[in-house]
Amino acid sequence: MKHRILFLLAISVLLNGCLNYTQVTTIKTDGSGSMFIHYWMKWATSKDSSVVEQLGIFSKDSVFKEFSSEYSSITNVEVYKDPADSSIHAKVELNFNSLDSLNITPAFRKSELSIKDGSKNTKIFSQFIPSIATGFGFESKNFSISYIYYLPGEILSHNATEVDRNKLTWKYSLDEIGTGKYITATYRAFKLKETPTWIFMCALFVLVVVIIYLFSKRMK
């Protein structure tokens, strides 16, 4: 699906339209997380709108199929038109068990999503953005592709275009992707929240009370 979305960039040239793709991903310390995807396109005429709809990437059933897998769950899909600016939109929200499990979904089959162990207790995140060959000779800077990741740790290195603490943004036009591009970041994961000591103390106190109660009951 995502590659069909990117292929639509070429089609949109013929329709005098413009496609934008934004992917926002939040990853938790245990590797699970959530993702929000929004892609939209403008068209010049009602005929253009009909052609775009026939491609299937703005079909709700098709979106469900392309983003579904046994390791992820779709929480929301929205497809709509905005007559105010002659645009058509698709929004997808999903949860996943682990980032690399998304690779088995049709939408991310060639994205090579991964989080691997690095040296000195670090993690290395990466995703591949495939090339988009069109051959139409259009101004590719008019098209926007954005990837936003919230990584669960201290960022040590990255090739993002923008960074704000653990929020990294990669924003490209088609010519910047070229023959394909990896987005990557190395981080040191936040420590898992430890169970507060007072909880253990309360549990121990309750256990002692129960034992004393049971013991005194047997003595009677």
Image (cartoon, rainbow, N blue to C red):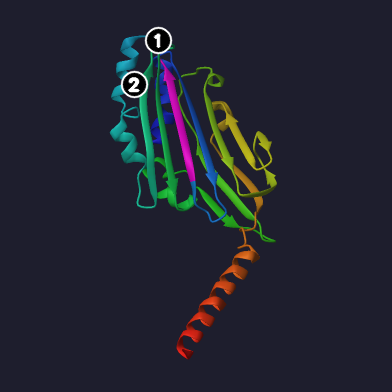
Q: Indicate the amino acid at tag 2.
A: Val
Q: Indicate the amino acid at tag 1.
A: Ala
Residue 11 horizontal side relative to residue 151, left or right: left
Q: Secondary structure at mark 1?
A: loop
In terms of depth relative to the viewer, which is nearer, 123 or 209?
209
Residue 147 image offset from top left, x and y in percent:
55, 35
Residue 111 image offset from top left, x and y in percent:
47, 43
Q: Is residue 38 magenta?
A: yes
Q: Which residue is mark 1?
A: 44
Res. 119 image quadrant? bottom right
In terms of depth relative to the viewer, which is nearer, 80 or 108?
80
Q: Is residue 175 magenta?
A: no
Q: Is the residue marked by circle 1 packed among few (<14), some (14-19), or many (20+) residues within 10 Å?
A: some
Q: Which residue is painted at 48% across and 53% down in the image?
A: 98
In the rendered view, tell whether residue 23 sits above or below residue 209.
Answer: above
Q: Is the residue marked by circle 2 packed among few (<14), some (14-19), or many (20+) residues within 10 Å?
A: many
In the rendered view, tell whether residue 146 sits above or below residue 106.
Answer: above
Q: Which mark is residue 52?
A: 2
Q: Secondary structure at mark 2?
A: helix
Residue 152 image offset from top left, x and y in percent:
61, 49
Q: Main secondary structure of the magenta part?
A: strand
Question: What span is colored magenta in the figure?
Answer: 34-44
Q: Which residue is painted at 54% across and 82% down in the image?
A: 212
Q: Which residue is painted at 56% across and 32% down in the image?
A: 177
The extreme top residue here reads 45
